[in-house]
Each structure stands twice: as structure tokens, then as C-alpha cells.
Amino acid sequence: MSSGLIVAIVVIAVVVAALGAFALHRHRQQHPSLSRRFGPEYERTVARYDGDTAAAERELARRVERHRELTLTPLSGEERARAEQEWAQVKTRFVDDPRQALAEAEALLARVARDRGYPDSDVDAQIDTISVDHGEHVESYRTLHALSRPDGAGRAGRTPDTEEQRAALLRARELFVALVGSGDEPERAPARTTTGAKASTARHARRLPTQREHHA
């Protein structure tokens, strides 16, 4: 092979690589909001598509479109209190029956999400839609769903140990807090205009889920 031909092949390879990098960079520039909006869920989706960023972003864009059709509403104070009480019962059950506790936690997440306005016809569809708002926490829902299967096996096809189940419940608690206590701006606005003892009570109530967050 002549040196001229070798040089030509190298030049073509460099040009092709440069064009590919430019196309990928341009595509990401066209959809920077998807990466920011979904956070860790963006990278997980790209990984599920074997690194195909364009395919992953089409999937995420479809989730956003479906999300726009929803009417999400905050829970009432009574609904939040009831949900918190039920989570406390889940923690109690975990001591004697971890897998059943995970199943109850999953059912509670599904119900709270439904009450907020997320679809509940299919768990995967619900999780995908929740990811639009809570991409940093939604993977915990998937883990909970896998570990609470009737056969007790996780994604790896083995029975998880108690510490793995406990960790799953702790992570799911973060999503639970986000859903139950994720007051929309219209819901939080009155608290900022409240004065005196009522304002202090409102601030404490909003901080309470965060203070509990390290507990399952």
C-alpha cells in the first residue's frame, strides 16, 4: 500500500470521526434541557439504549409530551398525613416481613402518585412519567418494584438480603417525600406571606420530611 493511500485513509478516518463528534455535540446542544431535567435518569436511559443518545432523547422527549397531558395537583393536608401514617406502618412491618413491607411501600407510592395525577394503568408507564419531575429519585421505585416481586428475587434473579431491602426502602422514602411533600409553587406561596407562629409552624412542617429522610 502506497504512503499516499495510507495518508488518504487516515484523513478520511479523522474526518468521519470529527463529523460524528460534531453531530453528537450538535444533537446534545439541541436538547440540553433533557439532560438537566432528567438528571441521573438521562444517563440511565442512554445506558438502556446502549449509548444511543439520539434514541434515548427521543424516549425522554416522549415522556415529556405525555407529561404535558397530565393535570398534577398537590395532596391535601389530610392526604399527606394519612400517607405519612401508612409509611410509618410500612417501617413497622419491615421488622417482621421485609418483602411484604417493600410491596406495601410500592403500593403506597403508586397510590400517592395516582392521587397526585400521574397515570396508574401500568407501573412502568407511571414510573416513566414520574421521572419527568423526579429523575433523581425514580430509580428507587424501579428497585422497589423488582425487590417486592412475589418470588422475592431482585433484578439479578437472586433473593436480596435484609440490608439490600432496607437500603431500597430508604431510597424509596426519598421519592415518597418528594411526591407527598412536593408542594407546587401555588401551594407554598401562602406560607411565605404568613406571619408569626403560623409562619414558624408552616416552615417546620415543610422541613419535617427532610429531617426524616434519613429514616426508612
Image (spheres, helix red, strand yellow):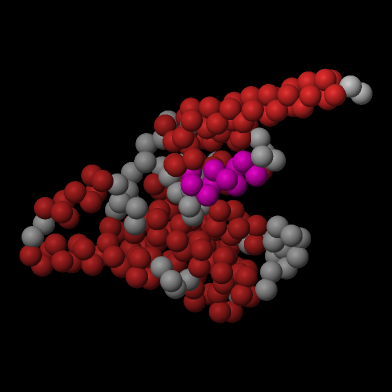
Q: Which residue occupies the extreme front position in the image?
A: 3
Measured from the top left, where is residue 54 in percent x and y? Answer: 60, 30
Q: Nearer the viewer, residue 23 or 44?
A: 23
The residue at the point 48 percent across, 52 percent down is 136
Against 176, residue 161 (above or below) is: below
Tell me where residue 56 sits by quadrant.
top right
Q: Position of residue 93 (x, y in %)?
A: 53, 75
Relative height, residue 29 to residue 35 (above, below)? above
Tell me which segment is drawn in magenta: 38-47
In the image as oriented, which residue stretches furthest toward the left?
196
* Residue drawn at point x = 25 percent, y = 65 percent: 205
Left or right: residue 74 compared with residue 48: left
Question: In terms of depth relative to the viewer, which is nearer, 6 or 210?
Answer: 6
* Residue 142 visible within the image: yes
Q: In the image, 141: left or right of 52?
A: left
Reply above or below: 115 against 211. Answer: above
**195 is higher (above) or lower (below) than 3:** below
Residue at position x 62%, y 31% from top? 21
Residue 127: in sight, yes or no?
no
Q: Position of residue 75 (x, y in %)?
A: 33, 51
Residue 15 horizontal side relative to residue 2, left or right: left
**Residue 4 on image: x %, y %:** 83, 20
Q: Is residue 106 magenta?
A: no
Q: Quarter holding the N terminus?
A: top right
Say which residue appears at 7% left-offset and 65% top-offset. Answer: 196
**Residue 178 found in image quarter:** bottom left
